[in-house]
Image: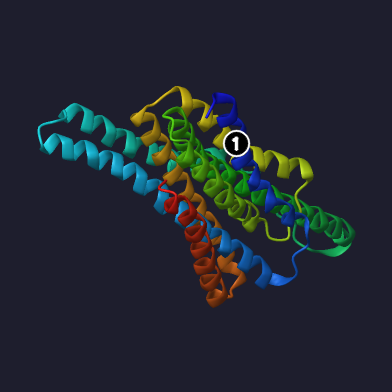
Amino acid sequence: MTFGQTIALGALAGLTIYLGLPLARLRLLGDRARVALAMFAVGVLAFLFIDVMGHGISILEDAVTALSKGKGSFGHALWLGLLLAGGFVAGTAGLALLERRAKPSGPVSPPMAGGEAAAALTVSQADALAAQADAARKRALQTGLAIAAAIGLHNFAEGLAIGVSAQAGEISLATVLIVGFALHNATEGFGIIGPLGDVRPSWRWLGLAGLIGGGPVFLGSVVGYNVTSEPLSLAFYALAGGAILYVIGEVWHGMRRYGHRELGLAMLSVGLMVAVVTDMVVAYGGG
């Protein structure tokens, strides 16, 4: 498989993330619909967390096993361990710090009611409510982009796998990886829009979110075809794992206020199983 074919198919695998994003333009009715979609997204994200951390820990385990058999160095194993820990912390605490800096400031509380200020009070309250609604919308969109970034880190690692297998001449494996990742990425669009609730994003926002989440498959294919680096793969696995865990917590916390706990847990299970099934396509082809 040529370099051009590899990056073209890698881009196609990433573009399937746009299949689920347009649903965010539909007005969801009621809290049950919001909880169902958001917790389905959490299920998909939970699988991605297990997947990326499993790959990252596997790289570290191989280094430790080689060390125990006298075939590796302590320094190499320690370096990979620090990469895993540092990447995970950067993905969790780093993302929390970035979101905190970008978080819109809360509205000023309206003045106390009284006498001739009644009319001014009404205007002040209306302004406060409008500011609260605007802050809530901005936070929902920021959370969606944070999820897209976490998914993008995961997808970069997927792109690396595509590029490495194609460069090694394993065309059948690369093809199956591309098909499997394309199916898998189609479900990840729900992970991005799930926490938006009744916030209706613009087409521009959806385009940006899809680029952030799906574009790294293309980039990873380019890098994987030209560079083979175990530490690089481990670093991105750790970053993705930390970021995904952070946004899972954010979405879970945001959905608690709506109730419908049993529905949410059921949809979490459905999302997890859908992600597992799509991933089995890759496993069936030996990926």
Instruction: Tell me which residue sits at (53%, 73%) in the image.
Output: 266
* 74 relative position to 238: left or right: left
In the picture of the structure, the residue carrying the numbered disc 1 is 9
**Of 24 and 260, which appears nearest the observer?**
24
* 62 relative position to 282: left or right: left
* Mark 1: secondary structure: helix
* 171 relative position to 121: left or right: left
Q: Hey, which quadrant is residue 264 in on the image?
A: bottom right
- Residue 255 sits above or below residue 172 on the image: below
Residue 17, x across and y down, in percent: 63, 47
Q: Hey, which quadrant is residue 57 in on the image?
A: top left
Instruction: Tell me which residue sits at (30%, 39%) in the image.
Output: 59
Q: Taking the image as drawn, is residue 184 in sight? A: yes
Residue 130, x across and y down, in percent: 79, 54
Disc 1 residue type (three-letter) = Leu
For mark 1, does the 10 Å Cα neighbourhood hold few (<14), some (14 to 19), or many (20 or more) residues? Answer: many
**Of 149 and 72, which appears nearest the observer?**
72
Q: Taking the image as drawn, is residue 107 in sight? A: no
Residue 79, x across and y down, in percent: 26, 30
**Of 86 and 183, which appears nearest the observer?**
183
Instruction: Tell me which residue sits at (44%, 49%) in the image.
Output: 285
